[in-house]
Amino acid sequence: MIEGFGDSALVIVNLVNPKEKFFGVLSSLSAAGVTARAINLDSFEDWVRQIARGEEVEIELLTMFFPLFRVERIFLDEPAGAIKSYSQIFEDVVGRPIREYLGI
């Protein structure tokens, strides 16, 4: 693995063709591509709200493989100044850390 991108790192994966963004837990990173347990960022807020309200969760993270030719870049899920990370947003809304919720 690349420094900082170890197993179970929380990441944002930007893809091309088509453009998509995913948030999740990195499983592996290789010359072939990226494997992560992730959710499309378009669904992130709905997912967090379902968990916070204690509803039956209809949206969940899925294990996915992204071929390297589609990967534009990968970011660690970190705050940037006043902008919170997705894991911080999750904890603010749900009331517990995402790692605890996911069992990692």
Image: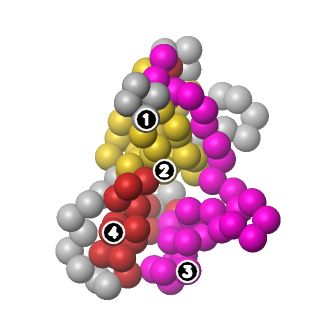
The residue where tag 1 is placed is 19
Marks 4 and 1 sit apart, C-alpha to C-alpha, by 20 Å
Asked whether, in this view, residue 91 is left or right of residue 49, the answer is right
Q: Residues within 10 Å of mark 2 (few under 14, many from 20)?
A: many
Q: Earlier in the sequence, mark 1 or mark 3?
A: 1
User: Of the numbered discs in the image, which one, if any, rests on residue 92?
Assistant: 3
Pointers 4 and 1 in contact (C-beta within 8 Å): no
What numbered label is drawn on residue 63? none
Q: Tag 2: residue type?
A: Phe
Above-or-below relation of 8 to 31: below
Label 4 and label 2: CA atoms lie apart by 13 Å
Using residue 78 as the reference point, say whether residue 52 is left or right of it.
Answer: left
Q: Which residue is mark 4?
A: 46
- Answer few, some or many: residues within 10 Å of disc 1's Cα (few below 14, many 20 plus, some between 14 and 19): few
Q: Quadrant of residue 29?
A: top right
In screen coordinates, is 70 left or right of 6? left
Label 3 and label 4: CA atoms lie apart by 14 Å
Whether 82 is among the magenta residues is yes
| Gap between marks 3 and 2 measured at Cα | 17 Å
Q: Are marks 3 and 4 in contact (CB under 8 Å)?
A: no
Tag 1 or tag 4, which sits nearer the N-term?
1
Q: Which residue is mark 2?
A: 23
Residue 59 appears in the figure: yes
- Tell me the distance, in whole angstroms, between the alpha carbons under discs 1 and 3: 28 Å
Q: At which x and y percent is residue 69? A: 48, 17
Q: Are marks 3 and 2 in contact (CB under 8 Å)?
A: no
